[in-house]
Amino acid sequence: MKRLILYTKLILLASITGVIPAMANDHVKLESATILELNEAFESGTLTSEKLVELYLKRIDAYDQQGPSLNSVMVIHPDAIDIARELDAERAESGPRSILHGIPIVLKDNFDTYDMQTTGGSRLFEGTPPAHDAFTVKKLRDAGAIIFAKVNMSGFMGTRVSTGDSAAGGQTLNPYNLAHHPGGSSGGTAVSLAAWFATAGLGTETGVSIRDPATNNAIVGIAPTEGLVSRTGVLPISFVHDRAGPMARSVTDAAAVLSVIAGIDPADMYTLTSAGKIPREGYTKYLDPDGLKGARIGVFVDLFNEPTDDFKESLEIIDQALEDLTENGAFLIGPVSLGIDLRSVLRWSRSSRIENKFALDTYFRGRGPDSPVSTLAEYIEAGFYYPHSRAALEESLAVESLDTHEGFAARMVNRANLRALTEALMDKYDLDALVYPMKAFPAAKLPTDGSRGELRPPDADNPFSSITGLPSIVVPAGYDSNNLPVAVEFLGRMFSEPDLIRIAYGYEQATQHRKSPETTPALEGEIIKLRH
C-alpha cells in the first residue's frame, strides 16, 4: 500500500515535469542522484531537504577550503538549513511546488540575490547585496529551490590568469587535475557541481563561459536559445551575446532547471521571442533513453581542428563519440559545412566590447541605491581591475553610441546571416542537430610564475552558439591521458531545446562517460535510500 501511495504521488509530481521516475533501484549515491531520484526519496520519506543541505555542507567543508582546496564557493546562504527545514514542512503540508522544491542550487556570482552579495568577481562589490533578485533567481525561489551558495567566477573586469579566478574569490581549481584550469567564466559553478557541493547550478556565457567550464569539469551545460532565459539582474557584458543557462551533472537535472527558469520577462525584451515556444509540460518530457534512434545529426566539419599534437588526443575522443552515435541509432550526415571561413566570420560577428559600457551602465543603475558605482566610468575610476584590462575598458568607454558606431550594425548583420546560413544548412539535410567538439584542446595548465599563462592554442574553442544565438548542449565524451575531460557539443535551430535534450540524453545514457573526480571522494552517509 505504501508503495502504491508513493507511486501515486510521483505521478502527480510528473504532471509538473512530464516524466515519471523509474522505480528500479532502492538506493542511489549522492554523487549521481538526479533531481527525479531525490524527489523520489523526498516523497518516500527517506530524505529531507534539510538532510540534503547538511550532506552538501559536509562536502564543502571537506573539499573546498580543505583537502584539494578547490576554492569554488564564495558564500553559503546563512539560512540554508532553516530554509530547507521550512520547505520540508511545506512539502509535508501541501506538497511540492515543483520538481525543484527543496533542491539546493548554486549561482555564479553574477546573478543578483537580494539576500547575498553579488560581486561579479570584483572586490568593489563585496558585502553589497543588490536590491532585487535576478528574474531567474526569483523563478527558482518561487519554485521552491534553495538558493544555496554563490560560487566563484572569472572576474568580469579581467582576471589574473584569464579564466577561473577572480580578485574577490581567488583561483578555483579543476578537481580532475588540480594543476589545470577549471574553465571560465562559470568555473565556480562547474567545479562545485563536479565535486557535488550542490544538485545543480546556473552559469552565464558571452562567448563560451557555460560550455567551456562544463567541458573541463565533465558536467552538462545548456546554452539556451537567445531569448529563452532572461538576463535581467545578471551582471552583463553584452546585450546581444549574454545568455544564462543551467549546469548540472546530468542531462536530467539540466532539463529540470531549464523547465523552471525559461520564460518571458517584460524587462528583457529578447524573451518575447520565446512566446508560444516553451513546452508547457517542461523539458524533462524529452528525456528519452532511445533519443538517438532515427536522429539525423550533421557532422559540422567547420568546427573541427586539424589533428595537430595539441588537438590529436581530444579529436580521437570525439571520433569515438561519433561512432557511439551511429551505434546507438543516429544517422550521421556529412561532413557538412557552411562553405565559408567560419573562424574569420565569428571574429567579425562579436559586439560585446562595443556594447559593454551600455550594458554595464544599465545594470549598475538598476542594482539599487547601495551600488558603489552607477557607470562604467565610475568603475574605472575606482580602480578595481587588473592593469592589463585597462585598455579594453577604455575602448568600451570610448563608444559614444551604438547607433553611430561604424562596426556595430555590420556585426549584427553578420550574426543574423550566420544564423540564417546555419539553419538553412540544417534544413538542406533535414538535420535534428549539428555535432562537433566544443573545443578540441583540454584544460590548460595553470601558470606557476604569476603570469596570465597561455591558456589554449588559437581557435581551440568556439563562440559559435553564443554568436548565432542558437541553442547548444555539451555532454561528457571521455577523458584524455591527463584525466582531463573532453565534451561533445550538439547545436540546433532556434528553440530546438527539446530535440537537443532528447539527443544529448540518448548519448549520455548510452555512453555513461561521466565519472567523479578522484580528489573529492564520497563521504560517509552519502547513500540515499529511495524508499523504505
Image (cartoon, helix red, strand yellow):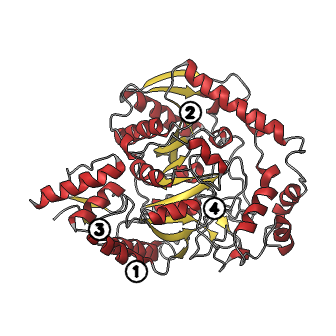
Residue named by callout 2: 493
Secondary element under disc 3, as helix, strand or loop, is: helix
User: Looking at the image, is mark 1 or mark 4 nearer the viewer?
Assistant: 1
Amino acid at the residue labelled 4: Gly
Task: Give neighbour class at mark 3: few <14, some 14-19, many 20+ (Cα, 10 Å).
Answer: few
Q: Amino acid at mark 2?
A: Arg
**Is the C terminus in the top left, top right, bottom left or bottom right quadrant?**
bottom left
- Binning the other alpha carbons within 10 Å of mark 2 as few (below 14), some (14 to 19) or many (20 upward) gives many
Question: Does the CB distance between marks 1 and 4 fall below 8 Å?
Answer: no
Residue 94's label in the rendered image is 3
Viewer-side label of 3, 4: 3
Callout 2 secondary element: loop
Place of residue 448 in the rendered image (x, y in percent of width and height, measured from the top left): 68, 65
- Residue nearer the viewer, 484 or 30: 30
Circles 1 and 3: CB atoms closer than 8 Å? no
Q: Which mark is residue 118?
A: none
- Which label's residue is closer to the chain start, 3 or 4? 3
**The N terminus lies in quadrant:** bottom left
Q: Nearer the viewer, residue 146 or 302?
A: 146
Mark 3 and mark 2 in contact? Answer it, CB < 8 Å.
no
Q: Quadrant of residue 4?
A: bottom left
In this picture, is 247 found above or below 292?
below
**Left or right: 179 in relation to 503:** right
Amino acid type, residue under disc 1 in the picture: Asp
Disc assigned to residue 82? 1
